[in-house]
Image (cartoon, coloured by chain):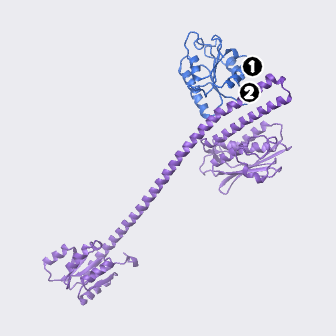
Chain colours: A blue, B purple
Amino acid sequence: MNVHEQELQILLVEDNPADAELTLDALREGHLVNQVQWVKDGAEALGVLLDRGPDSAVVNNRLRLVLLDLRLPKVDGLEVLRALRADERTRRLPVVVLTSSHEEIDIARAYDLGVNSYLVKPVESEAFMKTVNHLGLYWMLLNKLPGETK
Amino acid sequence: MNNHRDEEINILIVDDNPGKRSALETVVSGLGFRVLTAASGQEALHLLLAHDFAVILLDVNMPIMDGFETASIIHGRPRSEHTPIIFVTAISTTDDERFRGYRLGAVDYVFSPVMPEVLRAKVAVFADLYRLRRGAVRQVEQLATMNEQLRKEVAARYQAEEALTRSNADLLVANRELEAFSYSVSHDLRAPLRAIDGFSRKVITHYGDQLDDEGRRLLQVVRDNAQRMGQLIDDLLAFSRMGRREMELRPVDMEAMVKGVVEELRAVEPQRVIEFALAPLPRARGDAAMLRQVWLNLLGNAVKFSRQRPVANIEIGGRAAGGELLYWVKDNGAGFDQQYADKLFGVFQRLHRQDEFEGTGVGLAITQRILHRHHGRIRGEGQPDAGATFQFTLPLPALDDPRPEGETS
């Protein structure tokens, strides 16, 4: 799903199409779906996030949130996170890990690399919808980013 | 120095003249040594085959084999090469002869007729030397034996250590494989279930009006089972984690811990009437988070299986007994048939139907695993419809264990 660069506010990095569809369903319920771009692996994610062209969402300060799966083809989620934190433009970009893993080691590594939040996708679909809904509302409406205080 | 029987010291007198021989024997016989005599060099050599001597009194002038010849043969044998020889000779012996004797290893001369005190004193000195030397030799032998034993022990220990290192390495590999396995279970096994549940829900939401009740019920069965499978996977992973997790051993205030767990359980089902009878509990030593899990599982079971009672009675107690700590949880719930007691602690083993009491059958397996890791044991007793009692043990904490933090009494 590609959105116009002008509207891109959320980047969903997810290789599993079923999970992606369910996530987009939940964001749609929260009326956030038009602002989402879905990429299917870590390399593609870095392509979008580290793009420094004139239309880049990052350059234009529109991107507000990255939803990041951990187990990804090519470049895994933690590598994406590391690259984002190493780059001046994306150092402070909110990144929420949205994954299947309860493993302590993943949680600890993600926080060591500077993740903003870590959520485990519930199997039960009502709980899953609620989780994605809440996180969309929180990060898109409530959360303040640097440079937004007038 | 005392003379024990087995520490006997031998003296040999060699003289062809019976009169002189018995005279010498008389002189040295009062010293407490065993005195042997020989009438010729040959006889002396014969005795040397069977005995060791502290000193030999050797007549120089003997027929066939004289004293010098005898001495040279004696000192030619390794076993007697250091045996001291005192030559007994006439006062007229020339210096030349005496030097010959010394070259042959004579340690001394006495001149006949002998002065008894002089001879006794000399023999006594050699006997002392012999005794010291024999003691030293024995010590050396003992040391050699001990050394050999030590060497064997070290070798055995080294082998054991190598075996241990090997099995440790095997364990590490197995552990890593297990970790990789549960890591991929954690990541990959839940995703399809999420899709099954999520897409079934989408069908019900978007196409529910095109289905009849039975169609909707069937989809709900699919969803229920996907969710149950998710729960099973989560519990299995929790069980696996409990076995691998590093433990932090600290003093634990079990009573405070149980009070906290009881409050937590009450809050889950506030509408129920549950009487907890909590007796004072001895402190334990262990991993607090893991021991809390033990109480949560046992008390949670007691609460769950007493659900059908108008008033649930749950007793919690503990004491030090038989060199260990013993704790128990007793309820008046559904109980179980004692003949299935050995199945209680198996993974996914359940003694109740899913439609009676929910659960995956992992809680008690986790509980047992935690207790085993603490070198404790657990057992359960029950009777159908007459409640269950679970008892577990933990090792007594060391006496110098500090009290849990934040306590003053």
Task: Identify the amino acid type marked 2.
Answer: Gly
Q: Is the C-beta separation of discs 1 and 2 under 8 Å?
A: no
The answer to which image quadrant residue B359 occupies is top right
Q: Position of residue B182 (x, y in %)?
A: 62, 37
Front position in the image: A25 or B19:
A25
Identify which residue is drawn at 22% across, 73% down: B105
Q: Is B173 in front, or is B21?
A: B173
Mark 1 falls within which chain? A
Question: Where the C terminus of chain B falls, by quadrant?
Answer: top right
Near-viewer residue (A91 or A47): A47
Q: Are marks 1 and 2 on the same chain?
A: no
User: Of circles 1 and 2, which is in front?
Assistant: 2
* Residue B333 percent location from the top left of the image: 81, 47
Mark 1: few/some/many CA within 10 Å (<14, 14-19, 20+): some
Q: Which residue is mark 2?
A: B198
- Residue located beneath label 1 in the image: A29
**Residue A63 sits in which quadrant?**
top right
On the image, which quarter does residue B236 sit in?
top right
